Each structure stands twice: as structure tokens, then as C-alpha cells.
Amino acid sequence: MLSVYLNYPTGRVSAHGDPNCGRIRPMDKPDQRICRINVGTISSELQKFKVRQHSFQSTKDFNDMWLQIDFHDLEFELAVADFIRRLLARHYKPFSNAHLEIHC
């Protein structure tokens, strides 16, 4: 499973393949938004990003989100994460300049 942190307005997108990574906890917060993407949810979740149902704002409740992408295929999970970044870039300029940073 790949954990991907999305941060707005910085446009930060960081991927973590190690669930015990020390950089995951500091970015986690109470009531953290988490989007779980797997074989059963991929279509509906991508549609939510496409139509801005998952929105971002410069407020503590809507400035970030964790994606938990689970296909047991790291290369495909990274491709899904980057596709979501490109969907977000259509509506949120900071994500258009972002690159998927692979941390671990």
C-alpha cells in the first residue's frame, strides 16, 4: 500500500511506501481526511477528484489529505497518485507545478 500526502496551497505531493515512515505521523492530525483507493473504489474516487467533490482550501480542515492506494503494485499505485495530482492541477494551480516526491 502506498500512502500519499497532498498539501494545498503548497502543492506538495509525497509518497510513502513504508507504513512506519517517520514523516507520516507529523503530517497526520485529528479528523484527517483520508481517501482509500483500491479495486473496489477506484472509479468512484477518481470521479470525485474529477468533479471537485474532494476539494482543497487554505484552511486547516481542507488544506490536506492522505491517499491510501492499495493495489499490491507499487508502479501502478504511483501512476494512480500522479493521475490524481494531474486531476487536481486542473482546478488547483499549486498542484500543476508539483511533482510526486517519493520519500520511501
Image (cartoon, rainbow, N blue to C red):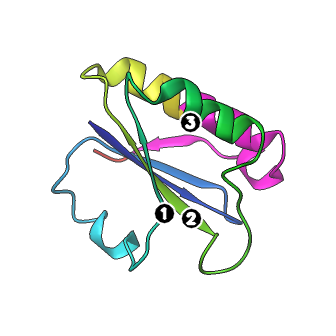
- On whether residue 24 falls in the magenta region, the answer is no
| Residue position marked by numbered label 3 in the rendering | 45
Q: Nearer the viewer, mark 1 or mark 2?
A: 1
Name the residue that disc number 2 marks.
64
In the drawing, what numbered circle is on residue 7? none
Q: Nearer the viewer, residue 21 or 71?
A: 71
Q: Residue furthest left?
A: 20
In the picture, the quarter occupied by the C terminus is top left
Distance CA(mark 1)–CA(mark 2): 7 Å
**Marks 1 and 2 in Cβ contact (< 8 Å):** yes
List x then y, in percent, for residue 61: 60, 76
Q: Secondary structure at mark 3?
A: helix
Q: Check the image and report above or below for 60 versus 38.
A: below
Answer above or below: position of 96 versus 76: below
Three-letter code, disc 2:
Asp
The magenta span reads: 82-102
Along the polypeptide, which appears first: circle 1 or circle 3? 1
Question: What's the CA distance linking mark 1 and mark 3?
Answer: 13 Å
Q: Earlier in the sequence, mark 3 or mark 2?
A: 3
Closest to the camera, between mark 3 and mark 2, is 3
Q: What's the mark number on residue 33?
A: 1
| Residue type of the residue flagged with mark 1 | Arg
